[in-house]
C-alpha cells in the first residue's frame, strides 16, 4: 500500500503561482491623481449627481384608479331623500370602500436633468474623495488573469476585509476584463464594471475603488472634456 502524499508541497506550489497582491495593487493618493481628476470635492455637486442617478432609476409605473376609472357605480345606491342616510351618488366615490383614489400616484417620469460637464465634475470629485480617504487603488491589469472567483476574492480582500469593493476595468484595452467580470459575478460585496459605466454614485457607494491603469487613463481623458 503506497503512503498518502503530503498536500503541503502542493499547497506551497499553488501559493507561489498566485500573484502577489502588493504587486497588483497600488494606493493612489490625491496628489498622484491625473490633473483632470484632482478636483476639490463639493458636497452639493456630488449630492446632485447621486440624487439624479437614483431618481433616473425609478420606473415611475405606480398607478391608481380615479373615480371614473373604477368599474361599476353607475347607479345611484339609494334615493336622494327619505332614507335618513347621507345622500350618495355612486358606490365608487372616494369615501366608499373600493372606490376611486384621490390624488393617488399615476405613471410619470422621475428623470432629473444634469449637464455633462457637471456630471463629469461630480465623478472626478468622487474619485478625489476616495483618494483623500486612501481608498483608491490602481491595479496592474496585465498581471491580473483571475478566471476563478476564488482567485479574484484573494486579490480584492487579501487581509480578509469585510468592506465593499468597486473594480473598474477597461473593456477594450484590458485583455482579462471579460474573465474578471465573469469571476466577480458571485462576489456579493464586489462590483466589476467598465470605465464607461462608472458614476459618482457607484464610486461613493463602495468602501474601496480599484481602477486599472487603462481605465484610469480613459477617465482622465473624459475629465479633460
Image: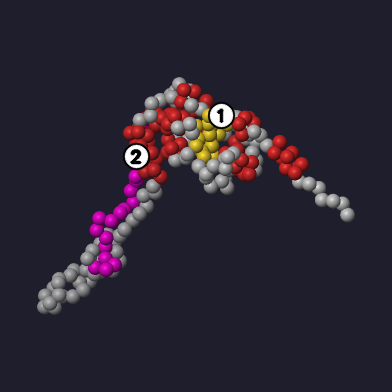
Q: Position of residue 131 (x, y in %)?
A: 46, 30
Location of residue 40 by image quarter:
top left
| Residue that numbered label 1 is attached to | 26
Q: Is residue 108 a member of the stretch shown in magenta? A: yes
165 vs 101, nearest the viewer = 165
Quarter of the picture holding the N terminus: bottom right
Q: Position of residue 65 (x, y in %)?
A: 30, 60
Is residue 170 something that shows in the picture? no
Element type at marker 1? strand
| Residue that numbered label 2 is attached to | 112
172 left or right of 30 in image: right
Mark 2–mark 1 Cα distance, whole angstroms, equals: 37 Å
Q: Is residue 90 a member of the stretch shown in magenta? A: no
215 left or right of 19 in image: left
Camera-near label (2 vs 1) is 1
Task: Examine the rendered structure and indicate whether residue 109 appears above or below residue 62.
Answer: above
Graded by Cα atoms within 10 Å as few (under 14), some (14 to 19) or many (20 or more), the crowding at tag 1 reads some
Element type at marker 2? loop
State the residue at coordinates (52%, 25%): 217
Q: Which residues are magenta?
A: 96-116
Location of residue 83 by image quarter:
bottom left
Amino acid at each position: 500500500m503506497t503512503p498518502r502524499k503530503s498536500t503541503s508541497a502542493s499547497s506551497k506550489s499553488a501559493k507561489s503561482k498566485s500573484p502577489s497582491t502588493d504587486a497588483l495593487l497600488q494606493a493612489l493618493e490625491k496628489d498622484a491623481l491625473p490633473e483632470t481628476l484632482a478636483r476639490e470635492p463639493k458636497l452639493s455637486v456630488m449630492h446632485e449627481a447621486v440624487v439624479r442617478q437614483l431618481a433616473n432609476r425609478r420606473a415611475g409605473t405606480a398607478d391608481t384608479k380615479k373615480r371614473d376609472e373604477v368599474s361599476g357605480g353607475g347607479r345611484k345606491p339609494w334615493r336622494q331623500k327619505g332614507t335618513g342616510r347621507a345622500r350618495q351618488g355612486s358606490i365608487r366615490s372616494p369615501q366608499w370602500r373600493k372606490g376611486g383614489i384621490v390624488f393617488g400616484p399615476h405613471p410619470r417620469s422621475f428623470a432629473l436633468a444634469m449637464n455633462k460637464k457637471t456630471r463629469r465634475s461630480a465623478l472626478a470629485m468622487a474619485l478625489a474623495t476616495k483618494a483623500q480617504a486612501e481608498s483608491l487603488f490602481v491595479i496592474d491589469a496585465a498581471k491580473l488573469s483571475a478566471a476563478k472567483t476564488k482567485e479574484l476574492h484573494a486579490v480584492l480582500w487579501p487581509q480578509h476585509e469585510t468592506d465593499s469593493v468597486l473594480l473598474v476595468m477597461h473593456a477594450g484595452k484590458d485583455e482579462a476584463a471579460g474573465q474578471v467580470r465573469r469571476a466577480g459575478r458571485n462576489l456579493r460585496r464586489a462590483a466589476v464594471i467598465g470605465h464607461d459605466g462608472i458614476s459618482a454614485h457607484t464610486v461613493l457607494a463602495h468602501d474601496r475603488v480599484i481602477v486599472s491603469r487603462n481605465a484610469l487613463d480613459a477617465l482622465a481623458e473624459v475629465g479633460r472634456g
